[in-house]
Amino acid sequence: MKIPYKIFLPILALLLLSCSGGGAGRSSGAGSGSGKNAPGYDPKTKTYKMKARKIGPDIYAVLSPARDLPNPKNGGWNSNSAFVITKDGVLLFDSGSSQKIGATLKQTIATVTDKPVRWIVNSHAHGDHWLGNAAFKKTVKDIYASEQVAESIFADGQTWIDRFRRMTKGAIGKSEIMAPEKTITKRTEVVLGGRKFVLFPSGNSHSRGDILLWMPEERALFTGDVVYSTRMPSTFASNLDRWIVMLGELERLKPRVVVPGHGDLTDATSITRMREMFTILWRETRKHQKNGLSPEKTLPLVRQAVLKFKPHYPGFEDKLKRDMARVHAQAEIANKRK
């Protein structure tokens, strides 16, 4: 189901303010809940504790331990980033929830290289993946994103700043909007600093305009929120049938390492698990919608069908309940079409 972005944004704001995530950990889904301070942020000193984790030749991931939305306890830092060192500078994939977080990310990159960030890729338009862009304005040459994401950042960037400032009670500080100017409309191969990167759209699977980055020689995949590992995926802005197809395409890449938008490092295991869960969720929702059941009556039946996945996904109950109306509406459209 397609919703005009100007109509969808207020809905998204309400959802973000009203929902929460779950725990942390490895792909098993074990870990801490949202009620504890995330160890990546110290509210007393108002500083972040980031670490560059090497995952390949001059390839690093910076993983947030938070498994909830931006809030005062995690300082707004709840999403993952990755970076690649080339002979001409650094490529950064997703820059975090604020300029302050981006500045800490810049310091973290400096612990492993003195080369500046020359290129940034913004996976999608949710503010926790691009609001750190401006921390790199003195060195960055190009910022890549899809046309849809670039447009929505230009139009609605201040809304994200204001929202995250409220949600974190000011912990994120002030942020400047620095929107992408290099737009991707199709699968595109670029060589930057002598290294090959493939940027490709997800088909609006998780949200409008998602793009991913693939390094075929190193078999490293940076997914943004198209892949979750130890956090229940959010489907309220998705095209679930397309998302299932995209996950199958990602499985066929056979990545050695996957940096998800949220959660710990993983591999194709998490991609397969997501596809299997979504396939059941979509099939069951379509069946019950076709039989005339409302979202409220469909929910417990779908929940039972996908219950075996709950141990892997903190936030399973809350997000399934929150997003059922969206998935049910998509199912209604799909049932009328076929």
Image (cartoon, helix red, strand yellow):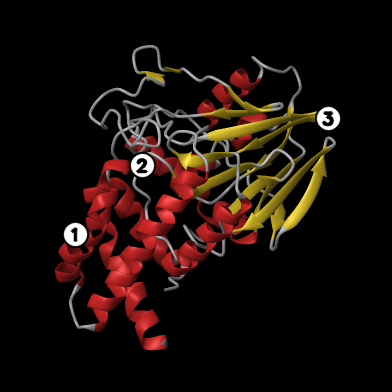
Q: Nearer the viewer, residue 263 or 150?
A: 263
Q: Secondary structure at mark 3?
A: loop
Rendering coords of residue 102 (x, y %): 56, 29
Write the residue at 57% across / 29% down.
61
Q: Is residue 112 visible?
A: yes
- Which residue carries the number 1 mark? 304
Which of disc 1 and disc 3 is earlier in sequence?
Answer: 3
Q: Is residue 236 visible?
A: no
Return the residue at label 3. 88
Residue hosting label 2: 231
In this rendering, position of residue 280 left or right of residue 195: left
Which of the marked residues, 2 or 3, is nearer the chain's N terminus? 3
Task: Residue 105: give x, y in percent of width and height.
Answer: 57, 25
Whether 5 is drawn above or below 229: the answer is below
Residue at x-position 42% and y-position 65%: 240
Q: Amino acid at mark 1?
A: Gln
Q: Are marks 2 and 3 in contact (CB under 8 Å)?
A: no
Q: Quadrant of the N terminus?
A: bottom left
| Crowd rating for badge 1 (residues with CA inside 10 Å; few <14, some 14–19, many 20+) | few
Which image quadrant for residue 136?
top right
The correct choice, above or below, for 139 with respect to 7 in the image is above
Q: CA distance from mark 2 to mark 3?
A: 35 Å
Image quadrant where residue 24 sits: top left
Residue 13 in picture, x, y percent from top left:
35, 52
Q: Nearer the viewer, residue 331 or 126?
A: 331
Amino acid under disc 3: Asp
Compared with residue 191, is residue 333 higher up or lower down, i.e. above or below?
A: below
Which numbered tag is attached to residue 124? Answer: none
